[in-house]
Amino acid sequence: MDSSATTRRLQHLSRHFKASNITTPPVRVTVTGAAGNIGYALVHMIGQGRLLGPNQQIILTLLELPMAKDQLEGTMMELRDCAFPLLKEIKGTTQYDQGFMGCDIAILVGAKPRGPGMERKDLLAANARIFKEQGEALEKYASRNVKVLVVGNPANTNALITAHFAPSIPKSNFTALTRLDQNRAQSIVAQRVSANVEDVRNIIIWGNHSTTQFADVSQATVQQNGISYTVRGLVADDAWLQKAFVEQVAKRGGAIIEKRKASSAASAASAVCDHIHDWLIGTDNGTFVSMGVITDGKLYGIKEQVCFSFPCICKDGNIKVVEGLKWDQFQQSMIDKTLKELLEEKEMALSVVIPK
Ligand SMILES: NC(=O)c1ccc[n+]([C@@H]2O[C@H](COP(=O)([O-])OP(=O)(O)OC[C@H]3O[C@@H](n4cnc5c(N)ncnc54)[C@H](O)[C@@H]3O)[C@@H](O)[C@H]2O)c1
Ligand SMILES: O=C(O)C[C@H](O)C(=O)O
C-alpha cells in the first residue's frame, strides 16, 4: 500500500474541509423554497462550504411560503444541529422584505415542480407570477450587486421575468441553472469513454433548460494519461453524439421523475453550488461552464431578449460568454429550435405577468 499517497490525500482533504483562515466578511445568501426537495439538500451543501469554498462564512436566509412554516422550522432545526462553522447566522422567514433585505446572492428555487408527462413550460401559468413577485421584491430590498440564480422551472423564462421586474439591477446579474444539464452530459461522456468525469471539459449546453436544449460536444475534450483528445474523436460515433446523447441529456429530468416520482433534488442542489462557486470564485483557465444569461441583442446574433444558455467563463464575479464559436448546419438547426421555444415561452409568460 502506498501510504505516502494516502497521507497526501488526507492532508489535502483536511485542508479543504477545515474552516480556518476566515478573513472576509460573511456573504448574505437567500434560498427560496428552502424547505422543499432541492432547498433541503441545498442548504446543507451550503453549510458544508460547497457554495463559496471552505473559508467563506455565510449568513443564510431561508425563505418559504407561510403554509410551509413547519417544514421551514424543521429544516432550520436540522441545519443548526449540523453545527456548520461556516454558517454565521441562520434565519428563516415567510416575508419577502426579511428574505431579501441586503442579500448578496439570491437562489430562487421556490416554485412548483412538474409531474410525470408534463413539460417544464407547462409550469409557466403556475410559476410565472412567483418570479414577478420575487423580481419586484429584489428590486425593493436586495443589494444592487445581488447575483441571482433562478432554478424554479421553466428556469430560463422565469429568470427573464425576474430581471424584468427588477429593472435597477443589471441584467448581467440574472442567470438560470443549466449546469445540471452540463454535469449530466459530462457524466454520460465520461462513462462512454471510461474517463474520470473531471477530465471531460467544455461540453456546452445551448439554449433552454428543456427538451429542446442542445448538448454540444464540438469543443469538448477528454484528458487521458496526460494527453488531450477531442470527445468526437474518442467517441467516434457522430450519429450517437447528435441524437441519442443529446436526447438522453435533454430528457434526463423527465426520466428521473418517472423513477423517483419527484424531480431531481440532490443533483440539482449540487449543480447550484457548482454554478455559484464558478461564477464568484472563477473558472479554471480555459474551461467553459454553461449558464443561462440574458441576451443583449449582440450575442451570437440573437436579437431578442431571452435567457439563453451559453458557454461562459467567469472572473472576479463577472460572466463572459465565450464568443465566436462557429456553428455548422446541424448546430444551427438545434440552436434555432431552442431559441424558437424560448421566444414562445417569453410570449406566454408575458401574457401571464403583464396581461393586456
Ligand atoms: N433548473 C434546474 O436544473 C432544476 C432542477 C430541478 C428542479 N428544478 C425546479 O425547481 C423547482 C423546485 O423543485 P423542488 O423539487 O424543490 O420542489 P418542492 O415542491 O419540493 O419545493 C418547492 C418549495 O418552494 C416553496 N415555494 C413555493 N412558492 C414559493 C414562494 N413564492 N416563495 C418561497 N417559497 C416558495 C414551497 O413551499 C416548497 O417548499 C421546481 O420548479 C423544479 O421544476 C429546476
Ligand atoms: O425535469 C424537471 O422537471 C426537473 C429539473 O428541471 C431537471 O432537469 O431535473
Image (cartoon, rainbow, N blue to C red):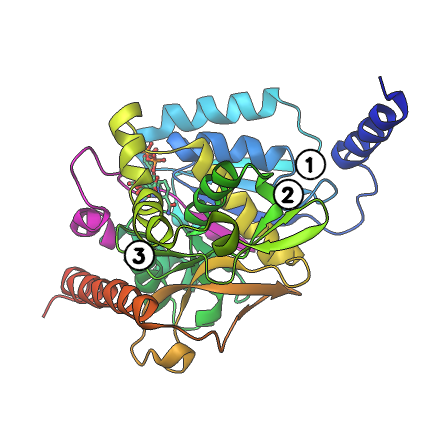
Query: Which badge, 2 or 3, is on the more N-terminal residue?
Result: 2
Q: Amino acid at mark 2?
A: Ile
What residue does disc 1 label?
A: 86
Between the C-alphas of marks 2 and 3, the distance is: 26 Å
Question: Percent from the top left, x then y, of residue 244?
Answer: 31, 45
Question: Percent from the top left, x then y, of residue 195?
Answer: 58, 39
Between the C-alphas of marks 1 and 2, the distance is: 6 Å
In which image quadrant can residue 160 be found? bottom left
Verify CB contact (< 8 Å) between mark 1 and mark 2: yes
45 to the left or right of 355: right
Q: Amino acid at mark 1?
A: Leu
What residue does disc 2 label?
A: 58
Q: Quadrant of ligand 2?
A: top left
What residue does disc 3 label?
A: 158
Q: Residue at x 65, y 65 (%)?
A: 315
> Residue 331 or 350: which is nearer the viewer?
331
Q: Residues within 10 Å of mark 1 (few under 14, many from 20)?
A: many
Question: Percent from the top left, x then y, of residue 101?
Answer: 50, 53
Under 8 Å from ligand 1: the CB of mark 3? no
Q: Residue at x 49, y 65 (%)?
A: 173
